């Protein structure tokens, strides 16, 4: 090895045998580095990992390569145009290999590099290359709907592993659908171009097309229940129904801007946002709206979300803004880019995700003070996302791409043959358990149910349920495969009810 060779990494198999790689160079030593000889190949090497003297992997630029002859020749196993820099590779054995790279990429292979899967992603579905996924919403961890730019509606009942198209009779079929509002397992609304609203009362088996009396595109919507809701869109159009869409009344929105998103924090207080950073608030259940226009931006606002009195808007040109006083004042949050953000899914005041038009997302765990890139493996811009907890969510994007994210830590069953007359959290069974156990609970009235797992020190380690449930009896299968043996607590909170129980994991 000459003195002008640029070496990026050195990897030793043992005390005497090792490799050194760099820019177009790969050398080998068999005498603890006293001398080095060229392997005869000239890859670009940032990282090396070998499992024996013959079999190893290298990472460099946007590729991962493998050798089975001590580096004399290499075969490319991974090559990407979206991961511009792969920084590190690690082989644990002949089958399990991981690499990391630019934009938070983390991939794993379980067959020696023949196939690679993004570690964060369970599955990537492609419905149709002509359809963009404009909206995606889930009722619970298993059941959800997606709406596309060409009037297609699809539904999943298995956490997004498979999607089935539902017939809507929407015409023309070129009309885009923009927003989904799920009331319960039966009642769902979707809004789209031409003033059209889709409605189902049987979980999507049948859909009716509702005429709202306007031809403006309906870009934003919010429904309190199956009867009462708002739709809004082009040129400040704002409509309200109180009878499930049979009739619509005009609401003065105080703007002529395009309204893209609507949200309410309680029965009276709500917000909308849209083009030219228009932002408005109501304190009388939407009867009147006061345009505040004080977000400090002139960008196009694509989405808005509130958690209590704290809110965020995501905009074009990489703008994220936050308010902590109900919208009276706003401040910018650094996103580190100028690409448009299309949607936001905040789980609480600290943790949430936003989608970017660059094939990856940003995540925060401190209320947006810092946003970190999350790469999911799909080579497509993202439009919409919906997360039900920090580990489980779905992302939709261009070319019909739907990405299912998260580990399968729970399976949820529902038994509503006899409706309960009280709230109750049952003792898990079996207990002690290894590694799975069943947790049952009952709720006598609908509400957002949260079940969290804590260790014996009181530290929260997981939230296995965080979703709206109708009144009924439910059961959850909890998997503790990734946890050590010990005493754990599980706590259920719904409406004003809380209860905590103990469980023991023995491995």
Image (cartoon, rainbow, N blue to C red):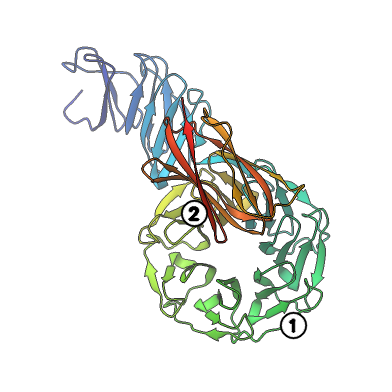
Say if 227 sits above or below 425 in the image: below
Residue 447's quadrant in the figure?
bottom right
**Mark 1 or 2, nearer chain start:** 1
Q: Is residue 156 left or right of residue 355?
A: right
Question: Considering depth in this image, is 506 or 147 the residue closer to the camera?
Answer: 506
Q: Residue at x 82, y 53 (%)?
A: 205
Residue 413: mark in rendering = none
Q: Position of residue 494 (x, y in %)?
A: 57, 57
Point out the frontmost of discs 1 and 2. 1
Asked whether disc 1 touches disc 2, contact meaning CB atoms under 8 Å apart, the reply is no
User: Which of these two is toward me, 91 or 405?
Assistant: 405
Residue shown at 46% from the left, 33% from the top: 482
Q: Kindly indicate the quadrant of the structure image that contains residue 157.
A: top right
Give the crowd class for mark 1: few <14, some 14-19, many >=20 residues within 10 Å. few
Q: Residue at x 49, y 36 (%)?
A: 503
Residue 412 as seen in the image, left or right of residue 94: right
| Residue 388 can be seen, yes or no | no
Residue identified by numbered label 1? 249
Residue at (81%, 58%) from the top-left corner?
168
Q: Which residue is mark 2?
A: 358
């Amino acid at each position: 090895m000459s003195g002008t060779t640029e070496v990026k990494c050195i990897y030793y198999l043992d005390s005497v045998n090792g490799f050194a790689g760099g820019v177009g160079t790969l050398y080998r030593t068999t005498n603890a580095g006293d001398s080095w000889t060229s392997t005869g190949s000239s890859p670009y090497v940032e990282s090396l990992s070998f499992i024996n003297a013959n079999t190893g992997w290298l990472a460099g630029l946007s590729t991962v390569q493998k050798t089975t002859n001590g580096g004399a020749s290499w075969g490319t196993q991974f090559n990407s145009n979206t991961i511009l820099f792969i920084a590190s590779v690690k082989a644990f054995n002949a089958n399990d290999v991981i690499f990391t790279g630019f934009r938070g990429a983390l991939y794993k292979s379980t067959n020696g590099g023949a196939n690679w899967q993004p570690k964060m992603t369970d599955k990537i579905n492609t419905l149709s290359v002509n359809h963009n996924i404009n909206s995606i919403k889930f009722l619970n961890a298993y059941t959800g709907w997606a709406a596309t730019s060409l009037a297609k509606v699809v539904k999943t009942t298995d956490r997004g592993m498979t999607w089935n198209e539902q017939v809507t009779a929407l015409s023309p079929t070129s009309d885009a659908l923009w927003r989904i509002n799920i009331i319960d397992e039966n009642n769902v609304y979707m809004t789209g171009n031409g003033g059209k609203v889709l409605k189902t009362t049987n979980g999507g088996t049948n859909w009716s097309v509702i005429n709202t009396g306007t031809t403006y595109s309906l870009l934003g919507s919010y429904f309190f229940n199956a009867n009462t809701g708002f739709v809004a869109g082009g040129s400040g159009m704002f409509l309200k129904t109180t009878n499930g869409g049979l009739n619509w009344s005009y609401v003065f929105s105080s703007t002529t801007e395009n309204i893209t998103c609507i949200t309410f924090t309680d029965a009276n207080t709500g917000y909308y946002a849209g083009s030219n950073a228009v932002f408005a608030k109501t304190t009388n259940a939407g009867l009147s709206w006061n345009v505040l226009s004080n977000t400090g931006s002139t960008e196009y606002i694509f989405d808005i979300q509130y958690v209590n009195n704290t809110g965020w808007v995501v905009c074009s040109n990489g703008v994220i803004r936050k308010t902590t006083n109900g919208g009276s004042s706003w401040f910018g949050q650094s996103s580190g880019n100028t690409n448009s953000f299309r949607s936001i899914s905040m789980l609480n005041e600290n943790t949430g995700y936003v989608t970017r038009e660059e094939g990856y997302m940003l995540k925060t765990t401190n209320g947006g003070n810092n946003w970190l890139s999350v790469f999911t493996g799909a080579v497509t811009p993202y439009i919409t996302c919906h997360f039900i907890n920090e580990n489980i969510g779905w992302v939709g994007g261009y070319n019909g791409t739907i990405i299912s994210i998260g580990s399968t830590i729970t399976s949820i069953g529902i038994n509503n043959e006899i409706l309960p007359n009280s709230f109750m959290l049952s003792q898990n069974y079996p207990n002690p358990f290894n590694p799975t156990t069943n947790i049952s609970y009952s709720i006598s009235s609908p509400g957002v149910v949260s079940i969290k797992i804590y260790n014996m020190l009181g530290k929260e380690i997981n939230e296995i349920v965080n979703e709206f449930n109708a009144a009924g009896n439910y059961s959850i299968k909890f998997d503790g495969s990734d946890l050590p043996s010990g005493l754990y607590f599980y706590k259920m909170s719904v409406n004003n009810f809380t209860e905590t129980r103990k469980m023991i994991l023995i491995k």
